[in-house]
Image: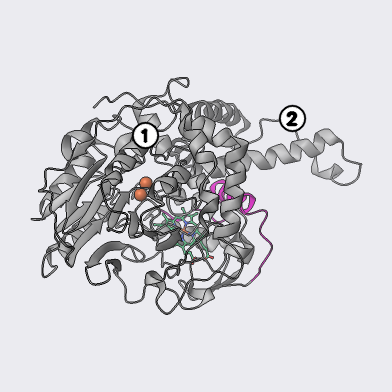
Amino acid sequence: MRATRSSWVALLAGLCLAGGTWLVLPEPPRPALAHKEPHTSEQLKLFQDLFMEQVGIGDLLFHGDAETERRLGVTLSKTGWACAMCHPYASDTHPAQFPKWQEQMSKFATLRDMINWCIEKPNEGEAIDPDGPAMKALEAYITWSNRNSPLQPGVH
Amino acid sequence: MSLDHHHDEHGDKLLGSDDFQQARREMRRVLWRPGLRADTQVSITRRIFIHRALLGGTAAAAATAGWLPRINTMDMAFAQEAGPPSTFRFAWISDTHLYPKEVNTRFVEKAVRAVNDVKAMDPPPDFLIFGGDLAQLGDPVELKLGAEIINELDVRKVFIPGEHDWYLDMGKTWNELFGTSPWTFDHKGVRFIGLDTVSRAMDFWTARNMTPTERMAAMATLDGALGGAWAGLGREQLDFLDRTLSDWGTDRPVVIFSHNPLYEYYPPWNFWVRDWREVHEIVKPYTKITNIHGHTHQVLYNEIGAMRSIGMLATSWPWPYAPEGVPKLTRPMLRVDPGDPFDGVGWGQITFNADNQHVEHEYMMWRKDILATSQVDSGTGDNPTTFLSPRPDGR
Ligand SMILES: [Fe+2]
Ligand SMILES: [Fe+2]
């Protein structure tokens, strides 16, 4: 764990230069070029690495890593609990079912709504920007962990 | 008792062997065979017999492998009571996961509520068994807070440790406060045995130069990979179990307390002990044997051979069922409302019925309904379509 943590810290330290973005890796192709030229295998690997980087950050947030929370300016919990305590391997988060009717909120809800709901209810933390980096990272981790489950939109 | 950590070569070999893997598959085929269902009528008192041949074989071979743990066994100071069995009740509380009060009092409130419920039992229980994970991070402050709360109870108390109690100081504070394990005592015709299934993790911390706090944090992460297959009895404790049963008639009732389940449910979260096959080898001749365990924070029921296995609720928080391996004899608990801290949690009230010599268990959950009657309300309802993955980078 320590080795993993500190390599993340090193990685994250490197990221800060990029002024709020998380890219450490070579520049991805500019938007103007997207899909205009065939992708190289390096590019594809890069896309995957960029995705897994977010999964890694999401995993840290999900497991209550205080340093990552601080860096991203979020407070996911004030009870000392982490998401992973109740959702080991992101179990029971059901990303394949959203959006769906959510009884707790009495509304048609997205995965992001429910992430914020768990931040506010059991964790007594502060809801996060639904489009911010912490939310995207959490979503990346939750969907990646459940990637082998079939889509089941709307299932309760 | 030596507080050195126990390196478990025996466990290494056991897990690595092809034999073991094969036995695992065989066990699965039998235990989770198609068509086997929890009986919704009588659920927990039903008994099935699984053919025993699969329990032989590798266990004996593995038993001769190297083994280094050192344990002192302790007989409880209770009077050893002989005579015919009589009906009595006892209470189970476990998995309180207390934080220091400044961090969070939610879990403290629930532990206190369970203790008050036990206090209110009329007639009082003959004893309380605390089944481990008293503390969240093994902090002496947490363990002492737990001792204070439990000591409010004016009944006989016995304790077995959980991994959350152990890995900060390797059991030092736990043993000082609550005594060492394993232990045994006889009560009204039943032989009770308390095991330590948590102290034998393989050393992942020395090579990584981890501090005790880091080691504890790793062990406190249910889905962390570093702790590996830490749950086990170890050779000496298997011998203790064998010895303890050897002068007890095979038709006489036995209750074994353990923090982890004594069968293979879901190894990635240590919902098992790695040497469960050897446990079953030892208990095989006994016809009235019940295992009561914590750690899984959910309603569970299983039978292997003649051994019945009952999984108890936590007072702190419930865990979702693992995506696979839930015993088919389990009638699952209802899905939990995450907005209600008192949902999905509770304690247990156990009756030993002298008439049929049966252990009857009542889940004391703080909600009206406990067991699901339909798939959609069941915590296991989504298992067939849920496929989880271990965390990235082997974390
Ligand atoms: Fe626990
Ligand atoms: Fe545990």
The reply to whether discs 1 and 2 touch (Cβ–Cβ < 8 Å) is no
Classify residue A49 as left or right of residue B325. Answer: right
Q: Chain of mark 2?
A: A
For the C terminus of chain B, the quadrant is top right
Q: Which residue is mark 2?
A: A26
- The reply to whether residue A30 is in sight is yes
The answer to whether residue A152 is magenta is yes
Residue A67 quadrant? top left
Residue B187 quadrant? bottom left
Q: Which residues are magenta?
A: A126-153
Q: Amino acid at mark 2?
A: Pro
* Mark 2 nearby-residue class (10 Å; few <14, some 14–19, many ≥20): few
Name above or below for residue B137 compared with residue A156. above
Name the mark on residue B33: none
Residue sitting nearer the eye, B325 or A116: B325
Q: Position of residue A43 (x, y in %)?
A: 81, 36
Q: Are marks 1 and 2 on the same chain?
A: no
Q: Which residue is mark 1?
A: B216
Q: Chain of mark 1?
A: B
Q: Secondary structure at mark 1?
A: helix
